[in-house]
Amino acid sequence: GAGVSQTPSNKVTEKGKYVELRCDPISGHTALYWYRQSLGQGPEFLIYFQGTGAADDSGLPNDRFFAVRPEGSVSTLKIQRTERGDSAVYLCASSPWTSGTRGEQFFGPGTRLTVL
Amino acid sequence: GENVEQHPSTLSVQEGDSAVIKCTYSDSASNYFPWYKQELGKGPQLIIDIRSNVGEKKDQRIAVTLNKTAKHFSLHITETQPEDSAVYFCAASMRQTGANNLFFGTGTRLTVIP
């Protein structure tokens, strides 16, 4: 079946601009995660949604970052006033997490964000 | 928070040999340990995982071992093939009635030489 999809695959923007990154999770997965992966590093947690609500946003680096999931499916990560240090691959993962399951996470291909 | 360390950062093996990647974690409350394979330009792909109530798990050529006392876990790949070449990440999380945020190691670039 279809996996996690992310759009766009690449985004180049100028410093100070606003960007939106989209994630379509696997159908039926209630849990959705955003991670950020810098070059040569492992993914770092940003935010977690269970349904429509952000259950844990402790990984967001500052208030320029915001994410929504209004209908409990598609999620959008929003970055305001982008900085060069925001350049990274932004990964989305979804999980069929329910009590009793392993809670395994399935990742999308990522969006490579470059801030010039 | 949780801190996961991974070694080695690079590993080269001859085709057919075994490869071992090791990770340590800091939070004794962590209870779920997945391993991901990431190929160039792609997202991480789950290849095997283990929960803290199990000491070892095997799936064909891949096995994972967990030592809760020492807080370390390892990935073993036997009979390596060129298509096993990729970056491998270990991760740890404390699965509870809430988030299952993964804390990742820094990755191991595995090269299998034909």
Image (spheres, rainbow, N blue to C red):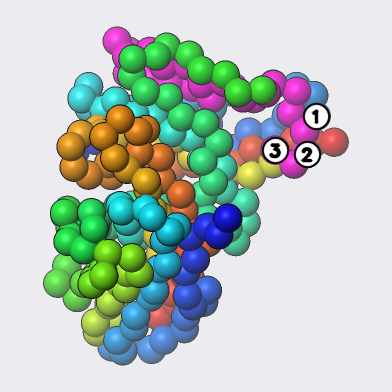
x and y percentages locating residue A37 in the rendered image: 41, 57
Q: Check the picture and name the quadrant holding the N terminus of chain A.
A: bottom right
In the image, is residue A53 above or below residue B96?
A: below
Residue situated furthest front in the rendering: A28
Picture residue at 59% right of the left edge, 37% below the top = B10
What amino acid type should be assigned to the residue bearing mark 1? Answer: Glu
In the image, is residue A101 above or below residue A90?
A: above
State the extent of the magenta-drawn residues as a range.
B61-84
x and y percentages locating residue B110 in the rendered image: 64, 38
Q: Nearer the viewer, residue B5 or B66?
A: B66
* Residue where numbered disc 1 is placed: B15
Task: Indicate the chain on which mark 2 is placed.
Answer: B
* Residue where numbered disc 3 is placed: B84
Q: Earlier in the sequence, mark 3 or mark 1?
A: 1
Task: Indicate the chain on which mark 1 is placed.
Answer: B
Question: Element under label 3?
Answer: helix
What amino acid type should be assigned to the residue bearing mark 3? Answer: Asp
x and y percentages locating residue A112 in the rendered image: 48, 71
